[in-house]
Image (tube, helix red, strand yellow):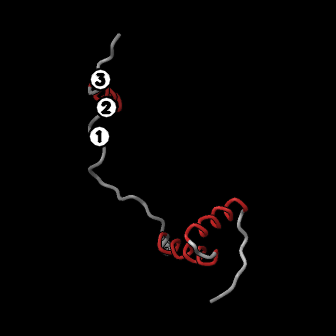
Amino acid sequence: MNKTQIQVPAGLFKEVRDFAKKREWSLAETFRRGAELLLQVYPEQPVAPDAAWTPPTSKRVGWKGLSAAQLRDAAFADGEPRLT
């Protein structure tokens, strides 16, 4: 077992001390259990890929054959009617 010294903000220290007291644990046991929980919750960081990821592309994506004006008109035609 290793012995170490840590710095904890006063508010957090009081909360941890009260938490430990309610469970009849020592502060050391409380911090050990907290560290074990962190290692379970946050697994090792994945290794960064060699190249930057880019989303796949498709040749069939888009509105081929429609001009910008035709696309705009189609979008408005599909919308809810406006009340005037």
Q: CA distance from mark 2 to mark 3?
A: 16 Å
- Give the crowd class for mark 3: few <14, some 14-19, many >=20 residues within 10 Å: few
Query: Identity of the amino acid at label 1?
Result: Trp
**Quadrant (top left, top right, bottom left, bottom right) of the N terminus:** bottom right
SS class, disc 2: helix
Quarter of the rendering containing residue 2: bottom right
Q: Given contact means CB atoms under 8 Å apart, are the residues at marks 2 and 3 in contact?
A: no
Query: Identity of the amino acid at label 2?
Result: Leu
- Give the crowd class for mark 2: few <14, some 14-19, many >=20 residues within 10 Å: few
First in sequence: mark 1 vs mark 3 = 1
SS class, disc 3: loop
Q: Tell me the number on the disc at residue 4.
A: none
**Quadrant (top left, top right, bottom left, bottom right) of the C terminus:** top left
Percent position of residue 29, x then y: 59, 78
Residue 26 vertical placement versus 61 (above, below): below
Q: Tell me the number on the disc at residue 63.
A: 1
State the residue at coordinates (64%, 62%): 15
Q: Which residue is mark 2?
A: 71
Q: Nearer the viewer, mark 1 or mark 3?
A: 3
State the residue at coordinates (28%, 41%): 64
Residue 73 vertical placement versus 7 (above, below): above
Q: CA distance from mark 1 to mark 2?
A: 8 Å
Q: Given contact means CB atoms under 8 Å apart, are the residues at marks 1 and 2 in contact?
A: yes
Q: Which residue is mark 3?
A: 80
Residue 83 vertical placement versus 51 (above, below): above
Q: CA distance from mark 1 to mark 3?
A: 22 Å
The answer to whether 70 appears left or right of 50 in the picture is left
Percent position of residue 16, x then y: 63, 66
